[in-house]
Each structure stands twice: as structure tokens, then as C-alpha cells.
Amino acid sequence: MQSNGINETKVKPENQDLVTLQKDIHSLKSEKEKWFNKKEELKKVVSEFILKIREVREKKDKINAEVKELKKIRDEKNKEVHEKISKLKEFSPAKTDKKQSPDLIKQRIDKLEETIETEVLGMNKEKQIMKEIGKLRQEYKEAKEEKSHLTDRKKINNEINTIKNEAQKLHKVVQEKAKESKKVYDEYMELSRKLKELNKEQEEAFDNFLKFKNQYTEIAKETKKTSKKIKEKRKQKTIKDNDFKKRKDKRILEENKKLVEEKLRKGQKLTTEDIIKLQGINE
């Protein structure tokens, strides 16, 4: 079973710490990258939510501004209605008894005046007609005023009805806009709630990323330090082994030299092996 290029079944005791550290650093690296990706993904989602909230808030503010303006116009219309009602109350109450039209009264006056001018009347009869003419002239004056007032009242009533209708239409639009504003406001609050949750989740992801990053950094330092120690130990062992080998080879050469010299001294014939040993001594 291989792990990070080291056969765990043949791990030397001095390398066990390094193997453990390499396992830890691999695990921490995976966790660090997982939380980094999570953090970046949430960062993108949060940015999209912020843009959406901004759009909804602008829409809400626009609707509220429209509602405010519509209410202002509606209130002005209602104020105008009250002013016209007050103006209507300034007129004298309409007479309960129905008067003749001013034109008919004028005709009667003209006829009576013509009678006085064209006929021979007695003193009493003339006074009686003159008295009736005076009375008719007063009625004529009142009838003209009443007719004028009726015309004015009718005009103002029509204006009041027109303005009331306009105010009612505006009020209906205000109500519809208010409903729309409420719907947009609810959407805004829901988006804000979700954004708050996303921000919290993003902070947790960032905290986890930092935690595993710091642990990874510490373990990486420890791994580098341990690896350096192991390399130094291996280097020293190699130097020591080489030195031991040199001393061993030197001892063997010296022993071979003595054997060859002993044979030469005794006049014994040198074998091929002896010649090889002699060459190794000369080298």
C-alpha cells in the first residue's frame, strides 16, 4: 500500500514521524481547499443577492415615491372638494316654494305697465296695479337671483362630483400601489433574511478555511523540518558508512599486502588472485 510515495509496510522507525506528517498535510490540504472553494462559491452567491436586493430596494423606493405623489394629488383633490362644499354653503338656502321663471314675471310686469299706459283707470285701480307691479318686480329680482344661484350651485355640484371621482380613482390607484409596495417589501425582507444567513455561512466557511490553512502551514513547516532532519541523518550515516568501508578496505589491503610480501619473501609462486591483490595494493 503506497502513501505519498513511501511503502508503509517498510517504513523505518526514524521515518514514521514524516509519514504521519505527510498524511496530516494531505488531509489538511484537502480540507483547506474544500473550505476555500466553499467560501468563494458563497462569495459569488452573496454578490448576486446584494445586486438583487439593490434592484428590489430601488423598485420599492420608486413605488413608495409614486404612492407619496399620488396621495399628495388625492389629498389636494379632497381639499378642493371641501373648499367647494364650503363655497356651496355660502349660497342662501333654496326656497321651498317654487317660483315662476323670471321671464314669465317680466311678461306680467310689462303687461300691467302697458295697461296703465293704454287704459283709463280709476285712481284706486291704478294704485292697485302699481302695487302689484312693485310686488312683481321684487319677485322678479328674487327669481333672477335664485336662478343665478341655482346655476352656480349646479355648476359647483358638478365640479364636486368630477373632483370626487378623480379623488376616488386616485385612491384606488394608491391602494393598488400600496399592495404592490407591500409585496415588494416582503420580497426585500425575505432576500435580506437569506442574505444574513448567507453572510453567516460565508463567515463560517472563511473561519474554517483560515483554521485549516494555519494548521496546514504549521504541519508543512514541521514536515520540512522533519524531512531536513532525516536527510541530515541519512547524510551523516552515508559519511559514516563510507568511512567505515574505507577503513575496512584499507585493513583488507594491508592484510593482502602482508600475505603477498610473505609469499615473495618465502619465494613462493604468486597466484592470479595474489597478482590481483597486488594490483589493488598498488592502486
Image (cartoon, grey):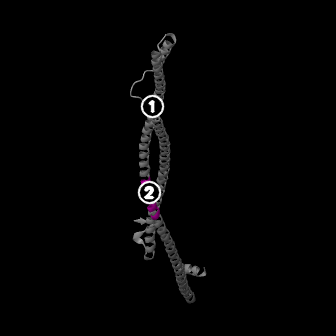
- The residue to which callout 2 is attached is 196
Q: Does the magenta stretch include residue 202?
A: yes
Residue at x 47%, y 50% (from the top left corner) = 53
Question: Dot 1: within a 10 Å radius of its alpha carbon, few (fewer than 14), some, or many (20 or more) residues?
Answer: some
The correct choice, above or below, for 127 with respect to 194 in the image is above
Give the residue type that dot 1 points to. Answer: Asn
Say how many tags the image has: 2
* Residue found at the far top of this picture: 119
Residue at x 44%, y 74% (from the top left corner) = 17
Q: Nearer the viewer, residue 48 or 163?
A: 163
* Residue found at the far right of this picture: 282
- The location of residue 128, given as percent across then percent down, is 45, 18
Mark 1: secondary structure: helix
The correct choice, above or below, for 86 with respect to 40 in the image is above
Quadrant where the C terminus sits is bottom right
Of callouts 1 and 2, the N-terminal one: 1
Give the residue type that dot 2 points to. Answer: Lys
- The residue to which callout 1 is attached is 157
Q: Are marks 1 and 2 in contact (CB under 8 Å)?
A: no
* Residue numbers of the magenta segment: 192-207
Q: Does the magenta stretch include residue 237?
A: no
Asked if residue 4 shows in the view, the reply is no
Mark 2: secondary structure: helix
Q: Which of 215 and 185 is in front in this view?
A: 185
